[in-house]
Amino acid sequence: MQPQTEKKVLIIIPAYNEEVSIGAVIDDVRKAMPTATVLVVDDGSSDNTSAVARKHGAKLLAHTFNMGIGATVQTGYKYALLHNYDIAVQVDADGQHPPAQIKELIKPIIEGRANVVIGSRFLGQGDYKPSLARGVGIAIFSKIVSIILREEITDTTSGFRAVDKEALKFLEGCYPDDYPEVEALVLLHKKRFAIMEVPVTMAERQGGKSSITTGKSAYYMIKVLLAIMVDLIKKV
Amino acid sequence: MIQIIAIITTLVFLVLVIDFIRRGLLKEKYAVLWLGFIVVIAILAIWKNLLDMIAMRVGIAYSPSLLFLVAFIFILLILLHYSVVISVLTDRNKRLAQEITIIKSRLEETIGKDSQPK
């Protein structure tokens, strides 16, 4: 393996009202990846997310108003391209993603085996147990996306992912707004980027709650499926 | 009677649209749609025989209904056009906000560095 210092790595932490957990996440990421830059993109939080991020030594981009997770990650991608980073890694601010495993995430990119790497909760030793409704939804997405991509993707909604410069250049211009994790996979596939999954073990959330509650799961699923259909006919 | 109402309404519309263009409240680009709409409705309202003829041809017993049908289709088209315009504006708005975010952070860094040596 080539030394990692050759590649400029940006860790993007999209955050919306995450003052409780973000400090610890930044510290852990910096400890795990001392040579990487940590960038917090604050999506118009009304709490002290920005101040906490600064105090913990992260670079900060703050949206003037809330624009959603898609636009937030995309702002990070734009920053990555502007400052010539080779790899951008997305890590959630709620402490669910294990910073120690970022190295595993970027390894396939450094070795030139993939453009996009997803940290999957369902490959290998993970002990993540979703609720029944969510489990069913996740399984259905996984099936559909796997069929479209002609490659097995077990964790389509995982936000723990790394992208290389080529994928950055593409996503910077057309990162989806509504359900970016799933939709981006479809778009990336249409552009024939090499997508890969690596197993990760995710911790329980440290703070905040999932944007998807069990009751809304079915509705969420239908909307994502529609979005995927739209992506399939979209010109990229 | 309905013919008179239709003619008056179209005239009011025409005056409104022209006045909006004159005062710069309506971009010419969007005014074209409205003017086209007004012209078609006006022709159908004034030339009643034409309306009756088309109505009979397409099987509408009460010919002023055709007027409403045409108006309805035009309004749908205009709404669709607006959805497209809004989508384009939303995307531009997002891109501007993202660029402002990045420029803002750059600016803060520069100002921070400038004030340090004092």
Image: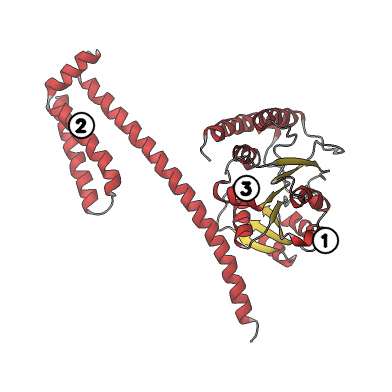
- Count of labels in the image: 3
* Residue projecting furthest to the right: A125
Tag 1 or tag 3, which sits nearer the N-term? 1
Q: Which mark is residue A69?
A: 3
Chain to which the residue tagged by mark 2 belongs: B
Bin the neighbour count of mark 1 within 10 Å (Cα to Cα): few under 14, some 14-19, many 20 and up: few
- The residues tagged by marks 1 and 2 sit, at their Cα atoms, a distance apart of 70 Å
**In this rendering, does residue A104 appear at all?**
yes
**Mark 1 sits on what residue?**
A31
Q: Which residue lies at the image location 64% right of the left edge and 61% below the top edge?
A: A84
For residue A25, what is the image quadrant? bottom right
The answer to whether the residues at label 2 and label 3 have Cβ atoms under 8 Å apart is no
Do marks 2 and 3 share a chain? no
Q: Observer-nearest residue: B9 or B29?
A: B29
Q: Is residue A110 above or below residue A196?
A: below
Q: Chain of mark 3?
A: A
Residue type highlighted by circle 1: Lys
Q: Amino acid at mark 2?
A: Val
Residue A20 falls left or right of residue A16: right
User: Element at badge 2?
Assistant: helix
Residue B60 visible to an observer of this rendering: no
The image quadrant that residue B35 belongs to is top left
Quarter holding residue A176: top right
